[in-house]
């Protein structure tokens, strides 16, 4: 079995699971998936098992594979994990980060700011935000922070995307965009000054601002999932 075959199937299934192409709690039909993805059962099964280990799917003996559930507590737990990962990475970054890499991340904010403040595509907005946070974690010099954060991002991505879509549909959407980039700049200002407490306060406040809306965000995500499924 070629590893590339497993990787391809894994990548496609991961995207489907992250975007809730499978409904929350839905049992997966392996035969249909194998046909849909043009895969044999062996690489499909390996990819499915990998996604269980990554938290995108669940497995029960005798019942098979299912899509993960979507509940406020599930998302809240992931947000708590995200805060822990990013704050610990930032603490290390305050000690280790090279000045040139901090300035490069600041230049990235300058480059995306015009698009960020006017963009109405929630997926594009989310990509810009995730890029910043992953690059920020990478300043720690510890790739495990980045790898784990990428996993958490994938598992909350759909809820965050719907949350961003809802925010952009409000009349004050332009203000929201500016505030979010200001928060990013405050984080970098603290990091540039090697003021870990200031940088950590800015980061924690930034993430928890959206975490507090978890229940509403999940309800909106559920509504979108089943609206998309309607004929």
Image (spheres, rainbow, N blue to C red):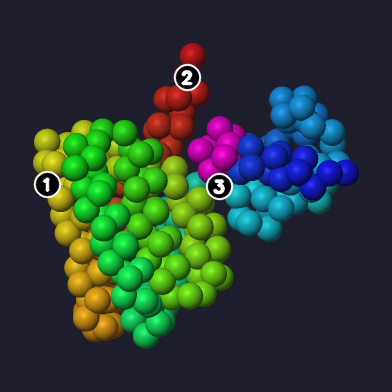
Mark sitting on residue 175: 1
Is disc 3 placed on a helix, strand or loop? Answer: loop
Position of residue 158 relative to residue 192, above or below, is: above
Which residue is at a point 71% across and 53% down the rendered structure image? Answer: 50
Q: Compute the Cα span from label 1 to label 3.
A: 33 Å
Looking at the rendering, the stretch of residues picked out in magenta corresponds to 15-22
**Is residue 66 left or right of 123 when viewed as pictured?**
right
Circle 3 packing at 10 Å, graded few (<14), some (14-19), many (20+), is some
Q: Nearer the viewer, mark 1 or mark 3?
A: 1
Between discs 2 and 1, the one toward the N terminus? 1
- Residue 57: percent from the left, percent from the top? 64, 48
- Residue 225: percent from the left, percent from the top? 46, 32
Which residue is at a point 44% across and 47% down the rendered structure image? Answer: 157
The residue tagged 2 is 230
Q: Is residue 20 magenta?
A: yes
Q: Is residue 182 magenta?
A: no
- Residue 147: percent from the left, percent from the top? 55, 63
Q: Nearer the viewer, mark 2 or mark 1?
A: 1
Is disc 2 placed on a helix, strand or loop? Answer: loop
Position of residue 76 relative to residue 66, above or below, is: below
- Residue 123: percent from the left, percent from the top? 38, 38
Mark sitting on residue 81: none
Between discs 1 and 3, the one toward the N terminus? 3
The residue tagged 3 is 69
């Amino acid at each position: 079995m070629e590893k590339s075959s497993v990787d391809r199937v894994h990548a496609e299934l991961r995207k489907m699971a992250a975007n809730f192409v499978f409904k929350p709690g839905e049992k997966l039909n392996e035969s249909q998936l194998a046909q849909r993805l043009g895969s044999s059962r062996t690489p499909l099964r390996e990819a499915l098992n990998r996604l269980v280990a990554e938290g995108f799917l669940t497995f029960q003996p005798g019942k098979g594979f299912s899509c993960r559930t979507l509940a406020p507590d599930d998302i809240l737990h992931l947000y708590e994990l995200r805060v822990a990962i990013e704050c610990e990475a930032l603490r290390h970054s305050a000690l280790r980060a090279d000045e040139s890499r901090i300035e490069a991340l600041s230049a990235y904010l300058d480059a995306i700011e015009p698009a960020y403040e006017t963009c109405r595509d929630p997926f594009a907005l989310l990509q810009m935000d995730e890029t910043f946070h992953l690059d920020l974690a990478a300043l720690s010099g510890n790739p495990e922070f980045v790898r784990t954060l990428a996993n958490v991002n994938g598992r909350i991505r759909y809820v965050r995307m719907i949350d961003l879509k809802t925010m952009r549909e409000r009349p004050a959407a332009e203000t929201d965009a500016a505030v979010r980039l200001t928060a990013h700049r405050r984080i970098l200002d603290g990091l540039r000054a090697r003021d870990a407490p200031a940088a950590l306060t800015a980061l924690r406040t930034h993430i928890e601002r959206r975490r507090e809306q978890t229940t509403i965000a999940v309800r909106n995500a559920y509504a979108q999932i089943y609206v998309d499924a309607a004929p």
